Image (tube, rainbow, N blue to C red):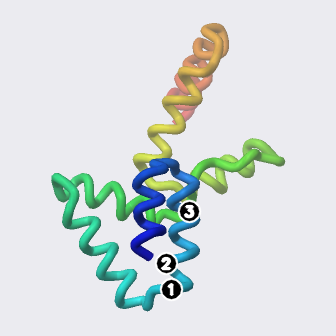
Amino acid sequence: MSRALGYCLTAGRFNSWFGFVIIAKARLTVVERAALAWAALRSLDSPDQAEIVAEGVISRADAPMPFLNTLEDARWWASLASLSERKAYALAAYEALPFEEQMAFRRSISEVEVAI
């Protein structure tokens, strides 16, 4: 386990940590994994940071997937995502739109607000 942890820290890639999860489940007990999680969260600089990390683990959304039925699948993903995930992806998606589409989106949102 110490070699696997060292590899993840050295590689510094997100995919490495996914591999660590698999190894930890196979090699460590639930109590050992919980203690490791506790120590890692306690090592962060603030309770807010620990909460963000814990929220990311507890949330069942993960990153948005390639949508097949675009709007329906996006709504399903959003129902699982945390508030911070929804805000981040909404802003990033909006910023990625061409200017004309941003303006159309703003008009659409304004119409929805008026209808409510």
Residue 56, above or below 25 = above
Closest to the observer, 43 or 58: 43
Q: Residue at x 82, y 47 (%)?
A: 69
SS class, disc 1: helix
Q: Which quarter of the rendered picture does the N terminus lie within? A: bottom left
Q: Which mark is residue 18?
A: 3
SS class, disc 3: helix
Q: Residue furthest left?
A: 46
SS class, disc 2: helix
Q: Are marks 1 and 2 in contact (CB under 8 Å)?
A: yes
- Left or right position of 56 against 14: left
The tag earlier along the polypeptide, 3 or 2, is 3
Amino acid type indicated by mark 1: Arg
Instruction: State the separation of the CA atoms marked 1 and 2.
Output: 5 Å
* Disc 2 target residue: 24
The crowd level at tag 2 (other Cα within 10 Å; few <14, some 14-19, many 20+) is some
Q: Which mark is residue 27?
A: 1
Residue 47 position within the rendered picture, expressed as x and y whole percent measured from the top left:
18, 58
Amino acid type indicated by mark 2: Ala
Closest to the observer, 16 or 101: 16
Q: Are marks 3 and 2 in contact (CB under 8 Å)?
A: no
Residue 55 position within the rendered picture, expressed as x and y whole percent measured from the top left:
38, 61
Instruction: State the separation of the CA atoms marked 3 and 2.
Output: 10 Å
Residue 113 position within the rendered picture, expressed as x and y whole percent measured from the top left:
50, 30
Q: Residue at x 20, y 66 (%)?
A: 42
Instruction: State the separation of the CA atoms marked 3 and 1.
Output: 15 Å
